[in-house]
Image (cartoon, rainbow, N blue to C red):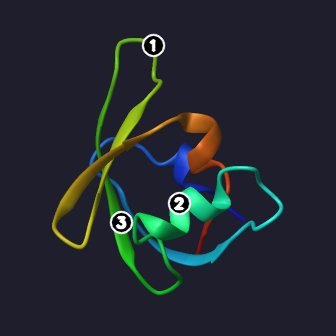
Amino acid sequence: MRTAAELNYREKGIISEIDVSHPSSKRILEHGFTPGQTIELISKSTFNDPIAISIRGTLIAIRKSEAGCIKLK
């Protein structure tokens, strides 16, 4: 199963689940990353961390390690 951390530039994915055992899962859920939502990788920084993801019309920057808890369909 792919994660949001594995998305390529301008690639979209649909969230299937959030790994609640991850330390940042609560923060991720509070930002609106919920199952069924479509996300798109908008940009990566110079060293690929953090990454900018578009969700629900909002651009959110998260660390690649945090994006690893977002499982995609």
Quadrant of the snapshot with the N terminus: bottom right
Q: Is residue 25 above or below residue 35?
A: above
**Residue drawn at 75 percent across, 50 percent down:** 23
**Residue type at numbered disc 3:** Ile
Marks 3 and 2, the one that precedes in the sequence: 2
Q: Is residue 33 above or below residue 54?
A: below
Q: To which residue does mark 1 refer? A: 47
Q: Which residue ends up furthest to the right in the rendered image?
A: 21
**Residue type at numbered disc 2:** Ile
Q: To which residue does mark 2 refer? A: 28
Q: Is residue 63 above or below residue 8?
A: above
Q: Residues within 10 Å of mark 2 (few under 14, many from 20)?
A: many
Spot occupied by residue 73 in the image (x, y as percentages of width and height): 58, 77
Mark 3 to mark 2: distance in Å?
13 Å
Report if the CB atoms under discs 1 and 3 are less than 8 Å apart.
no
Q: Secondary structure at mark 2?
A: helix
Report the side of 12 relative to 18 (left or right). left
Report if the CB atoms under discs 3 and 2 are less than 8 Å apart.
no
Q: To which residue does mark 3 refer? A: 39
Mark 1 to mark 3: distance in Å?
21 Å
Q: Secondary structure at mark 3?
A: strand
Spot occupied by residue 36 in the image (x, y as percentages of width and height): 46, 87
**Residue drawn at 77 percent across, 54 percent down:** 22
**Residue type at numbered disc 1:** Phe
Q: Quadrant of residue 13?
A: bottom left
